[in-house]
Amino acid sequence: MKVKVGINGYGTIGKRVAYAVTRQDDMELIGVTKTKPDFEAYRAEELGIPVYAASEEFLPRFEKAGFEVAGTLNDLLEKVDVIIDATPGGMGAKNKPIYEKAGVKAIFQGGEKADVAQVSFVAQANYEKALGKDYVRVVSCNTTGLVRTLSAIQDYIDYVYAVMIRRAADPNDIKRGPINAIKPSVTVPSHHGPDVQTVIPINIETSAFVVPTTIMHVHSVMVELKKPLEAKDVIEIFENTTRVILFEKEKGFESTAQLIEFARDLHREWNNLYEIAVWKESISVRGNRLFYIQAVHQESDVVPENIDAIRAMFEMADKWESIKKTNESLGILK
Ligand SMILES: NC(=O)C1=CN([C@@H]2O[C@H](COP(=O)(O)OP(=O)(O)OC[C@H]3O[C@@H](n4cnc5c(N)ncnc54)[C@H](OP(=O)(O)O)[C@@H]3O)[C@@H](O)[C@H]2O)C=CC1
Ligand SMILES: O=C(OP(=O)(O)O)[C@H](O)COP(=O)(O)O
């Protein structure tokens, strides 16, 4: 039996998760919601994906354009086992009562607060915690990136200090698009440190800055070690960590631009780089301090997490079985 999946919010994250669902042999994409009949709605229709209005209030927009929807969100909820809420940050919490009323499991995204769900999730760190759960939150793209590498060296961590250099907007965003400024999050810690702690119990402080780019976030990570670890050990650990890839400046990976070019060269859909990119040369240890620099493709690293979260919630596979299946289906390198 395939799990029936619906997507509420067919935007940057929603459309990528929808695509990933169609790549799974144990899941079925039942439909997606839109608030308006724009090109994304027409493209979904072309792909044979049923489009539902996100609520009744949006129906006149579709009627006016002559776009035939399959119903509204409530109709979609009647047909699915799980809904992926990929609506703008904060909207998921408002939608939750609708999902509860429909008796449908739900996965929320990182723009929601942790208390929206029973568990905050990164597959390789805490898959088991989501087993059988009804409400799971896939943490934000930056938090996912931090958890992927930090959980791999968790036993060595005394304290982490990390600086997030965040892209100003996604490439399709014409409202927030790169400003000619560096904008600090003046609240310290930024939400990322406390968010990491909702997944793994480590000491961590973070601060964050927005810079004028649309392609990827970069993290400068500093770890105080509680037991000895050499750079070569960290390299070996990361080489053996799923969804983490080492890139070398020596081979031309000088910036986020080349990382995205690499994803294009792989012919990845939407140039998704699902893996966290760690610069190999940046990994260094001085005394009891470890340093490394990594990049996160904000539009895609959380996509495999949503797929694994579905399998955990329906207890369809154990952790490594699910991760392997998801990785293979999306061409994730390791
Ligand atoms: N973009 C990113 O880099 C990342 C985002 N996230 C998180 O994922 C979530 C979604 O973000 P993202 O995909 O970027 O957002 P987008 O703005 O790209 O997409 C949001 C979608 O929600 C839909 N929507 C808008 N209003 C409503 C409504 N009233 N009811 C139902 N749907 C609505 C929009 O539909 P329509 O187009 O039809 O108006 C749109 O398709 C957020 O929690 C965000 O924090 C997590 C990791 C990375
Ligand atoms: O989850 C993300 O970033 P975050 O981890 O910095 O909150 C996404 O890049 C969305 O960030 P945004 O809230 O700046 O759109």
Image: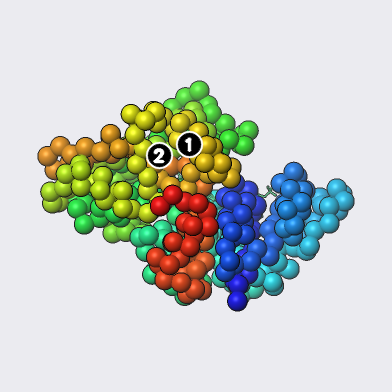
- Mark 1 is surrounded, within 10 Å at the Cα level, by few (under 14), some (14 to 19) or many (20 or more) other residues, namely some
Residue depicted at 12% across the width and 48% down the height: 228
Q: In the rendered image, which residue does mark 2 sit on?
A: 295
Q: Of 200 and 251, which appears nearest the observer?
A: 251
Image height of 183 relative to 56, above or below: above
Q: Quadrant of residue 318?
A: bottom left
Image location of residue 104, percent across then percent down? 60, 72
Give the label, 1 or 2, closer to the camera: 1
Q: From the top left corner, tell me how far across and down residue 131 is, in percent.
A: 44, 72
Query: Amino acid under label 2?
Result: Ala
- Considering the image in quadrants, where does the N terminus appear? bottom right
Query: What percent of the width, then of the height, locates residue 320?
Result: 39, 65
Circle 1 sits in a helix, a strand or a loop, which is it? helix
Amino acid bearing label 1:
Phe
Which residue does the numbered mark 1 point to in the structure image? 262
Q: Is residue 22 left or right of residue 311?
A: right
Q: Answer yes or no: is residue 2 visible.
A: yes
Residue 105: which quarter of the image?
A: bottom right
Residue beneath the point at 30% across and 48% down: 238
Q: Is residue 215 visible?
A: no
332 to 199, vertically: above or below: above
Given residues 127 and 317, the one toward you in this image is 317
Query: Going from the N terminus, do you reach mark 1 or mark 2 first?
Result: 1
From the top left corner, tell me how far across and down residue 126 is, in percent: 37, 64
SS at mark 2 in the image: strand
Residue beneath the point at 16% across and 47% down: 229
